[in-house]
Image: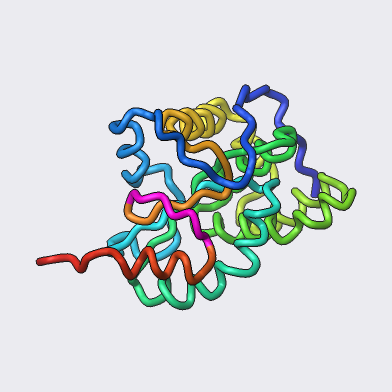
Amino acid sequence: MIIRPLLVAFGLMAFVAPPAWAQTAPEQARAALAVVQAQDRVLGRFDAPITVIEYASFTCPHCATWHQTVLPAFKARFIDSGQVRLVFRDLPTAPQGLSVPAAAMARCAAPEAYFEVAQALMDGQAALRAGGDPNAWMSRAAQTARRPVTELQACMNDAATQSALNAGVEAAVAGGVTGTPMFLVNGRLVEDSSLEGLARAIDDIPPTVE
């Protein structure tokens, strides 16, 4: 299976880990980050009372570590129970010649397959960073996309896909996101992305009054 890289330059900004919160960002732009958009990819009940937003890149080693070591327990404890919905937002980091096509491919997968593709990309990142074949990395992840390869490639190169990724990055930059991974719990930045750190942030949220 061949997944050709995107031929169109996205002009995305480069980001570095660990995360930081730009205090100079306008309050309105920062507040807008907490709003779940139609184009967001969501894991869990859409009406879950707590929203955790993750900004991540498929070439960010810290992001891969989180998805491999924290996400399984986080999902079992908070998402599967219906308490939390996890929103994944792409923030492609260097090398963008790899992270941008990967983000586009995940976005172009069947909606129900998004997190499978994302996990496959995260799981394959270590081999890629060790000198593995980028096409093999993309191809293995594409096998979980649940779309014909021709449709997947056409979507990846579509201007609408590129615009959606750029719009997401622009909103993140305007809101003060400066690195990956970065987590917001009901709109509040959480510096400690360990299971315990996120659990504390979730537990600190006042119960909803009906």
Q: Which residue is drawn at 30% across and 39% down?
A: 31
Image quadrant for the C terminus?
Answer: bottom left
Q: Which residue is drawn at 63% across and 69% down?
A: 69
Residue furthest to the front in view is: 23
Q: Where is residue 124 in the image (x, y as percent from the top left)?
A: 76, 58
Indicate left or right for 30 with 55 as reference: left
Residue 191 magenta: yes
Residue furthest to the right in view is: 131
Asked if residue 24 is positioned above or below residue 182 in the image, the reply reads above
Q: Which of 200 and 143 is in front in this view?
A: 200
Q: Residue at x 61, y 42 (%)?
A: 103
Residue 149 magenta: no
Q: Which of 50 and 27 is in front in this view?
A: 27
Indicate left or right for 198 with 27 as reference: right
Residue furthest to the left in view is: 210
Q: Which residue is drawn at 40% across and 57% down?
A: 52
Q: How many numbered marks are there?
A: 0
Q: State which region is magenta.
A: 187-193
Q: Where is residue 140 in the image (x, y as percent from the top left)?
A: 76, 56
Quarter holding residue 209:
bottom left
Asked if residue 10 is positioned above or below residue 37 in the image, the reply reads above
Quarter holding residue 24:
top left
